[in-house]
Amino acid sequence: MDHVSVVVDDLEAAIGFFAALGMEVEGKASVEGDEVDRLCALDGVRADIAMMRTPDGHGKLELTKYRTPKALGAEQANAPANTFGLRSLMFAVDDIDAVVPRLRATGAELVGEMVQYEDVYRLCYVRGPEGIIVALAEQLDRKDKPAA
């Protein structure tokens, strides 16, 4: 897989949210023209795109803001976790307790609670701009666990 694409209304807010998660802007571009119209099966496409990459360079996220035609909402705002379609993007983090406050500073909110899954992970869902949900997973270091 090359990347995941997310359509947003506030491109700068989305960039800020994913930057707080540790992603970096790889590039920005505006796209329009006959080829773009044909690709999207829309007329008069004018869009701004920001390509972001994970710190390890292996994952990419394309954020797209359609200036024309106006983007349409595909589902209800704040859809629950069991709604059909893409629900979340999961990121592995080293310190979930440090990442969540950075995301909250961008206006993000926890969807549910932060939980520990067995002795393997600490997990949570965070809802950011445009209702985008990211899952955060911190793998627990088993070396810190006392021997049974």
Image (spheres, grey):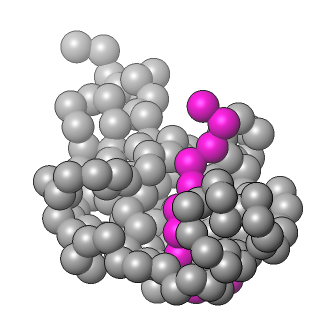
- Left or right of 131 on screen, residue 25: right
Residue 87, quarter of the rendered image: bottom left
Magenta stretch encompasses residue 86: no
Residue 52 to residue 70: above or below: above
* Residue at x 46% of width, y 85% of height: 107
- In the image, which residues are magenta? 1-13
Q: Is residue 34 visible?
A: yes
Residue 107 to residue 113: above or below: below
Residue 32 to residue 133: above or below: below
Q: Nearer the viewer, residue 81 or 28?
A: 28
* Residue at x 17% of width, y 57% of height: 83
Quadrant in which the N terminus is drawn: top right
* Residue at x 43% of width, y 34% of height: 139
- Left or right of 42 on screen, residue 140: left
Q: Nearer the viewer, residue 24 or 143?
A: 24
Q: Nearer the viewer, residue 67 or 92?
A: 67
Point out residue 27 in the picture as x, y percentages from the top left corner: 85, 62
Quadrant in which the C terminus is drawn: top left
- Left or right of 27 on screen, residue 4: left
- Left or right of 136 on screen, residue 75: left
Point out residue 81 in the picture as x, y percentages from the top left corner: 19, 57
Point out residue 24 in the picture as x, y percentages from the top left corner: 76, 59
Point out residue 144 in the picture as x, y percentages from the top left corner: 43, 28
Residue 10, quarter of the rendered image: bottom right
Q: Nearer the viewer, residue 103 or 146?
A: 103
Residue 140 to residue 129: above or below: above
Number of marks in picture: 0
Q: Is residue 19 visible?
A: no
* Residue at x 79% of width, y 70% of height: 33
